[in-house]
Image (tube, grey):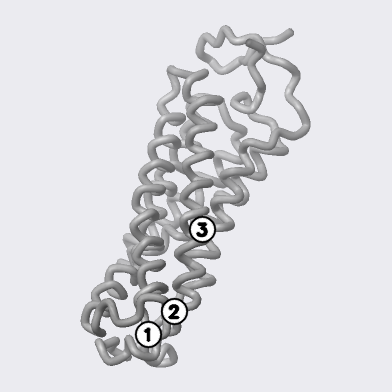
Amino acid sequence: MATVATGHEESDTVAPTPRFRAWPLWAAGSGALGFFCTVVTDTRAGDTSDPDYMVTVADMAALDHVWFRVGGIAGYFAVAAILVFAALWHRRVAQRFTWSLGAPIVTYGFIASAAALSLAYGWKGALGDYLHGAAEEGTFDDQGLYVYYVMHDFSPYIGWVPVTVGLLGLAWMAFRERLVSRALGGVAGFFALLLLGAVAVTGVPGLPFASSLVLVVVGTWLAVGRSPITREALV
């Protein structure tokens, strides 16, 4: 038997680190689903070939409701996966390493993103239900549909900001608390700072959506790699 060496007192007795553990794959799955819902199903109104085109109420009639509906439904599954991972992280990491500052940042970041994305994907799904040709066509006029479209516009992209902050928490756990491999923490921290820096430089608020792809890497890495947080405690 061995104990985890973290620089802080850790009394849990742990088993040898297994080659693979499945629970971090909830992060990878939520990231992959989130990218699909946010980017692949993204549908733009008007002339998308003209960057200066101004979207108006008149463009609502031409929008296809199908991808909005698919993205909204799949988005709810992405939110569910995010919350499952947050619960697993809280149980397996935050409650074990109670002295850690980075661990609750990850937990809260995922929960905050789940809340924001619930609204974002809900608005996407609403368009899939209310647009012309959809199940509840005629519930709102084009002016009402335009309001939904504007609310939906960047919201699935902006909703990933708290996850981006959570990636910084992971970097803190790697370099300050020695709970995550430095390579993994370096990747997470680098991309988090890159995305937030890009927002500051370009003024585009939705760039943190790329954190969904980083989650695929992080979740897979935690599943197959070696970090103190993935050593199972014997209780």
Quadrant in which the C terminus is drawn: top right
Task: Tell me the SS state at disc 1.
Answer: loop
Residue under circle 2?
A: 65
As drawn, 103 above or below 111: above
At label 3, counting other C-alpha atoms closer than 10 Å, the crowd grade (few under 14, some 14-19, many 20 or more) is many
Residue under circle 1?
A: 132
> From this viewpoint, which residue is outermost toward the right?
19
Where is residue 139 shown, x and y percent of the image? 28, 77
* Mark 1 vs mark 3: in front: 1
Residue under circle 3?
A: 34
Residue type highlighted by circle 3? Gly
Where is residue 167 shown, x and y percent of the image? 47, 43
Q: Looking at this view, is 139 or 107 the one in front?
A: 139
Q: Earlier in the sequence, mark 1 or mark 3?
A: 3
Q: Is residue 74 left or right of residue 220?
A: left
Residue type highlighted by circle 2? His
As drawn, 36 above or below 145: above
Q: Is residue 147 left or right of residue 180?
A: left
**Residue 158 in sight in this render:** yes
Question: Image point 49% across, 77% down: which residue?
Answer: 66
